[in-house]
Image: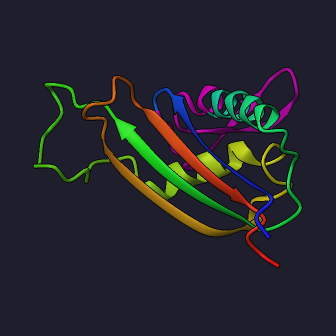
């Protein structure tokens, strides 16, 4: 039974969920792990706030059911970008971009990202869109 669905565009520069870097913290006297991708924290925060608003708008609550997620990541094509035709074959990797978005949705759209039972993701040049970002399609309640 489908409990709800929505599609929402989140503008911004997508940041991949990549490797973690350990940094020594003098104040904490221990190694603190931080994401190596610049802008990842801000990107995940933006996704979280916008999707919270979308869920409130549709009167949806965090799901305990299965969820299907579709991601369309859009990137601006700058004059300095090596252009290899229409294909978007440059970094960042699609799997790391998807992980960043799925982790940003944890605790908002679903309790844990293991509830995602269907995932589709694409990355492409923004083209006619004025902004780079991600379009998130969510269908809540995909498992019986």
- Quadrant placement of the N terminus: bottom right
**Residue 30 coordinates in the image, percent (x, y):** 83, 36
- Which residue is depicted at the point 43% across and 44% down? 73
Query: On the rendered structure, is 46 left or right of 75?
Result: right
**Residue 36 coordinates in the image, percent (x, y):** 56, 39
Q: Which residues are magenta?
A: 14-43
The image shows residue 55, relative to residue 143, as above or below, that is above
Q: How many marks?
A: 0
- Which residue is depicted at the point 77% across and 38% down? 58
The image shows residue 46, relative to residue 101, as above or below, that is above
Of 78 and 138, the residue lying toward us = 138
**Residue 144 coordinates in the image, percent (x, y):** 82, 79
Is residue 33 something that shows in the picture? yes
Of 53 and 82, the residue lying toward us = 53
- Which residue is depicted at the point 54% across and 56% down? 70
Is residue 17 something that shows in the picture? no
Of 103 and 59, the residue lying toward us = 59
**Residue 87 coordinates in the image, percent (x, y):** 20, 53
């Amino acid at each position: 039974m489908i409990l709800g669905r929505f599609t929402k565009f989140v503008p911004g520069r997508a940041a991949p969920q990549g490797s973690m870097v350990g940094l020594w913290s003098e104040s904490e006297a221990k190694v603190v792990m931080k994401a190596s991708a610049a802008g990842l924290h801000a990107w995940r925060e933006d996704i979280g706030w916008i999707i919270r608003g979308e869920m409130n708008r549709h009167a949806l609550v965090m799901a305990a059911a299965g969820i299907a997620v579709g991601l369309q990541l859009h990137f601006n094509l700058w004059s300095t970008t090596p252009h290899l035709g229409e294909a978007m074959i440059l970094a960042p990797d699609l799997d790391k971009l998807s992980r960043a978005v799925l982790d940003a949705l944890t605790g908002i759209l679903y309790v844990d990202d293991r509830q995602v039972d269907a995932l589709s993701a694409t990355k492409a040049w923004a083209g006619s869109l004025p902004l780079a970002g991600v379009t998130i399609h969510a269908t809540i309640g995909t498992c019986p």
